[in-house]
Amino acid sequence: MIYGYCRVSSKSQALYGSSLDSQQQAILAKYPTAKITIEAYSGYKDTRPLFDELIKSLRKGDILVVTKLDRFCRSASNGINTLHYLYKVGVSFDILNMGVVENTAMGNLLFSVLQSFAQFERDMIVERTTAGKEIAKLKPDYHEGRTKIIVKDFSEKYAQKQKGFISVREAIASLGISKSKWYRLIEDTKGVQNGKKISI
């Protein structure tokens, strides 16, 4: 039996030829009878219940197919452990942009080296992201996370709305919040008036 595994960790990956559709089409182009498993999870959480279930269901003589190395695993150690398990069970492993990885010393060496580079690439992305955030922190208007609405600003807009000077749409536009947030703030304000702590 031939099994294809397609995975995305974010919507942005569709921009780089890693969308679920493109992966599925690539696998079926070579293996028309492949049974496809698709999964979408965060790459940093590394939780892939469907993949784990698929691996456990594989039997001797089966073929597991992925389009690229990073669709198979997220770390070198995880990849090597999974590959060794497939070898033990007697499952063939085909990475479409590399070829069939065979159970030989050279095959294991190649796989290990490529996985190390894949891990290095991910580490570099994290490093660049962290560096970008540190640079952004130097800006006077930098803030961590979502912008918090100052109670005073909301109170002023709410008062203007109550007097008919502005509409709700104008108020939320000036505060940069959604309509649902606007009404939550109203409820929070009422809570303060009733002796409860406001949560904005």
Image (tube, rainbow, N blue to C red):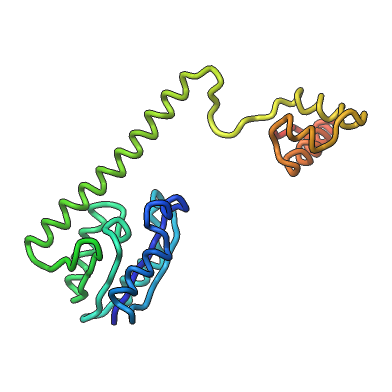
Q: Is residue 88 above or below residue 157?
A: below
Q: How many marks?
A: 0
Q: Residue 35, how many percent across, how many down?
A: 36, 78
Q: Residue at x 25, y 65 (%)?
A: 96
Which residue is more in the foreground, 157 or 185? 157
Looking at the rendering, which quadrant does residue 133 occupy? top left
Tell me the quarter of the image containing the N terminus.
bottom left
Q: Is residue 6 above or below residue 166?
A: below
Tell me the quarter of the image containing the C terminus.
top right
Left or right of residue 97, residue 104 in this image: left
Q: Residue at x 37, y 71 (%)?
A: 53
Q: Residue 80, how many percent across, how many down?
A: 20, 59
Looking at the rendering, which quadrant does residue 65 occupy? bottom left
User: Which residue extends farthest right?
Assistant: 163
Left or right of residue 154, residue 79 in this image: left
Which residue is more in the foreground, 196 or 84? 84
Looking at the rendering, which quadrant does residue 193 occupy? top right
Q: Is residue 41 above or below residue 55?
A: above
Q: Residue at x 26, y 47 (%)?
A: 119
Q: Residue at x 80, y 39 (%)?
A: 187
Left or right of residue 38, residue 113 in this image: left
Q: Residue 63, how many percent across, how many down?
A: 25, 76
Which residue is more in the foreground, 187 or 161? 161
Which residue is more in the foreground, 120 or 49? 120
Q: Is residue 143 above or below residue 68?
A: above
Q: Residue 110, how many percent across, how many down?
A: 13, 56
